[in-house]
Image (cartoon, rainbow, N blue to C red):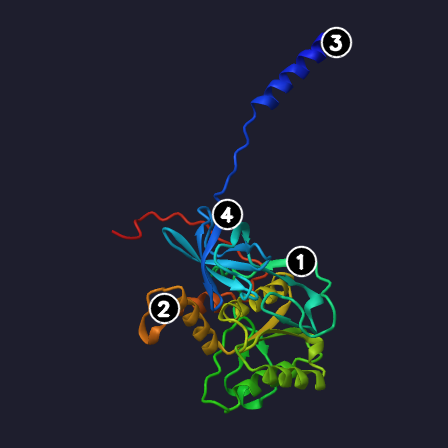
Amino acid sequence: MTDLIKQIAEDLQKQIEGFEPELNVSDIGTVTEAGDGIARIHGLANVKAQELVQFANGVMGTAFNLEKESVGVIIMGDYGGIIEGMSVRGTGRIASVPVGDAMIGRVVNALGEPIDGKGPIASTSFRPIERIAPGVVQRQDVDTPVQTGIKSIDAMIPVGRGQRELIIGDRQTGKTAIAIDTIINQKGQDLVCIYVAIGLKKSAIARTVGILEKNGAMEHTIVVVAAADESAALQYIVPYSGCAIGEEFLETGRDALIIYDDLSKHAWAYRQVSLLLRRPPGREAYPGDVFYLHSRLLERAVRLANKYVIVKKDFNEALAS
């Protein structure tokens, strides 16, 4: 037995002495350019689109452009401390936000962090901000109305649960007022409301929150904010963050109303980020995928069917010739 133990010890010693450590730097990059909320990274050979990356100072970013020699990253935080030569590493995951009932009544930023001074949010669940919209078979017919509290709308152009509705008009014509009135009208109902403020002045956001609190509507409302003085990157991701928060209620059998105020400023933020990253501009300098930007967001607003059945059928004749 002693000889066996000695032999094992000698074998282990030989393996330890012959071990040569190797450093894998495929997920490490270096900042070559930084400013205006974006950074260009050399390296990160294995990074994926929309993957979170972390700078050496702890600030997070999202891989936005995957180029041959570099990666364009939008910075989700304070970019003042990010300088050339700083190291960056991939995380292998995409951006996510806290979700759940603990979010109700709170005002949070684009990353789901509380900004209302009421302390941390006691949520243990997180959801990625990007997600593929449910397919046609999984959707339920629009058959249940959302009462806005405005008789002309409810009578002539009712809004249904699972429906998308555009509120369009000139400046100062009451578009936001319609949305706020709809949120207030849900008091005591079974509908959770999410108000996403994109590129608005902080004074306007504070006024809206004050109106909701005055009317007791914050008890069923979540406010997600990317103000006008925040980076274009945060204004770009904030509607997706709000949508992820709403999807948590969707998949737990509850209904949620989400309001984006407004998507024009979201398109402006996307244009700014795209131009900074030198994406090819199209009409009015918007990138070519600006329509997909909003369609992939709005198609996530659905009402899931309680059950659905796919019937298998054998076709005796060719469907096309």
The nearer-to-camera label among 1 and 3 is 3
In the picture, the disc for residue 234 is none
Q: Secondary structure at mark 1?
A: strand
The alpha-carbon separation of the residues under discs 3 and 4 comes to 47 Å
Q: Amino acid at mark 1?
A: Ser
Expressed as whole percent of the image width and height from the top left, the position of residue 167 reads 49, 82
Residue at 50% in and 46% down: 27
Q: Amino acid at mark 4?
A: Ile
Q: Residue furthest left?
A: 321
Residue drawn where x is 49% and y is 42% of the image: 25
Q: CA distance from mark 4 to mark 1?
A: 29 Å
Viewer-side residue, 274 vs 267: 274
| Secondary structure of residue under mark 2 | loop
In front of the other: 78 or 273: 78
Q: Secondary structure at mark 4?
A: strand
Which residue position is annotated with label 1? 125
Residue 224's spot in the image, x, y percent?
A: 60, 72
Q: Residues within 10 Å of mark 2 (few under 14, many from 20)?
A: many
* Mark 1 Cα-neighbour bin, 10 Å: few <14, some 14–19, many ≥20: few
Instruction: State if disc 2 and disc 3 touch (CB < 8 Å).
Output: no
Q: Quadrant of the N terminus?
A: top right
Query: Which is more foreground, mark 3 or mark 2?
Result: 3
Sequence-first tag of 1 and 3? 3
Tell me if residue 154 can be seen.
no
Tell which circle, 4 or 2, labels the residue nearer the N-terminal end: 4
- Residue 259 x %, y %: 56, 76
List the residue tagged with mark 2: 287
Q: Secondary structure at mark 3?
A: helix
The tag on residue 28 is 4
Which residue position holds label 3?
2
